[in-house]
Image (cartoon, helix red, strand yellow):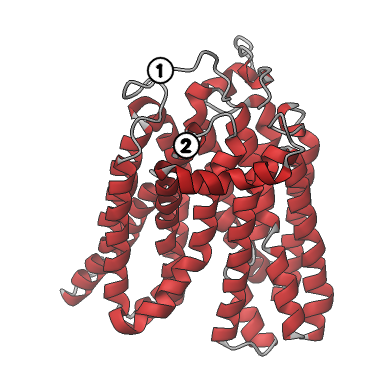
Amino acid sequence: MISEPSNLDSPPAAGGRSGLLERMGLPRPLLWGFIGLTLFMIGDGVETNILTPYLTGEHGFSIPLAGTLITVYGVAVAIAAFLSASLSDLWGPRKVMLIGASIWVVFELFFLLVALNSSNVVLVFIAYGLRGFGYPFFAYGFLVWISATANAKRLAVAIGWFYVAFSAGLPTLGALTATASLEIFGLNYYQTLWISLALVILGAAVALLGVKEKTGRAPLVNNPEQVWKTMSFGLRLLTSNRKALMVMLTRTINSVPTYGMAVFFPALFVDRFNWSVGQFLILTTVIYAVNIPFNLFFGALGDKLGWSKTVVWFGAILCAISMAGLYLVPAWAIDHGLSYAYPLTLLIGAVFGIGLAGFVPLSAIAVSLAPEHPGAAMASYNLGIGAAVFAGPLLVALLYTTLGAAGMVYLFAALYLVAALMSHSLRGTQPGFNGVSAPATEHVG
């Protein structure tokens, strides 16, 4: 690991913008990276709610075929999320981000110009599937850059800023951009996808050209020539360190319900609650809009209250309660003829969004398991993120017929309780807590 201190650890300038940013926990040398990440993820998120209706309405895809395409994409995301961390150790985070942006742009152009124009299903699967490697390399490469250079005492809040930028783009502002393109400017689905590409290019340029910090421009390990050893460290950490496995599984549970909800909640809203799909989309917007500021809040709280304790109570337990409430509350309110059933559901959704943010300190726990290899340590965490992209829809596909909507909601709530138990076992990883001594320097690694 590079031992020389990063300029992120330099004292903030008194009274200036640097001092303000440092007090907010936002690493000033990476500021343009956060802005670029937001723009990039807005571009990536534009297609979230329009791809399936576009493919089914204009290219002859069935719903199952579109779902299969998204599953293939999710597998690529999972692989890339895992590899991005180890590759950041090996090549440096900036190079991984550049590769990710290039993959996204090249295969999106192939998707738009060749695959869609020919309506060739095989080409659509190839182009869109391979594009799935793009955003994890870019986004999680930047996450490793943060983890490798941020002030150790403010690591969780710095990572909280990452999730503010990430979640602001995907799906929140990305979905709003798509809505504006379609409803306000009158563009069609295909034209809107070009806006997506333009935003991704802009975000990549802002981040890659704007960030001058030097640590992320070089390998984060002293022996980058040992390719296999570096690449396999994340896997070996998973098999040799029980806490790394717990981190990965907990991070998967964190996002599995949100991806699973997207599959069956629209039908639940229409068939059980007599609401519209549009009202489900409003609920989704509320969940993630509320989630954004609380990513930062729980990053800061975790640094002070304790990473593990924050994840257990404000993440897993709160999500378990609110997840169950997203079915039980509207069902009860509608059955009793309450006129405010939907606003009440939006309130529960807001609580669920807060709970999702409670998992933010989990990434700091991951880094603490192998601080000399921050990228490889994050690999297990990133694998959990990627696995959720396809695991959520897969659970619904396998169990929905048997359990129904209510059963799936209870299953997801139960998974959060399992995550609470695993998170409780992750105590003893945070410097200054539970007898763990603070590092000699503030630099991670």
**Which element type, helix, strand or loop, lies under badge 2?**
helix
Q: Which residue is mark 2?
A: 296
Q: Residue furthest left?
A: 336
Amino acid type for the residue under numbered disc 1: Ser
Q: Position of residue 399 (x, y in %)?
A: 36, 78
Q: Position of residue 226 (x, y in %)?
A: 73, 39
The reply to whether dot 2 and dot 1 touch (C-beta < 8 Å) is no
Amino acid type for the residue under numbered disc 2: Leu
**Residue in view at x 47 percent, y 34 percent:** 369
Q: Please tell me the numbered disc located at residue 323.
A: none
Residue 442 seen from this side: yes
Q: Which residue is mark 1?
A: 437
**Residue in view at x 62 percent, y 85 percent:** 56
- Crowding near the residue tagged with mark 2, few <14, some 14–19, many ≥20 C-alpha atoms within 10 Å: many
Q: Position of residue 381 (x, y in %)?
A: 51, 47
Asked if 308 appears above or below 182 in the picture, the reply is above
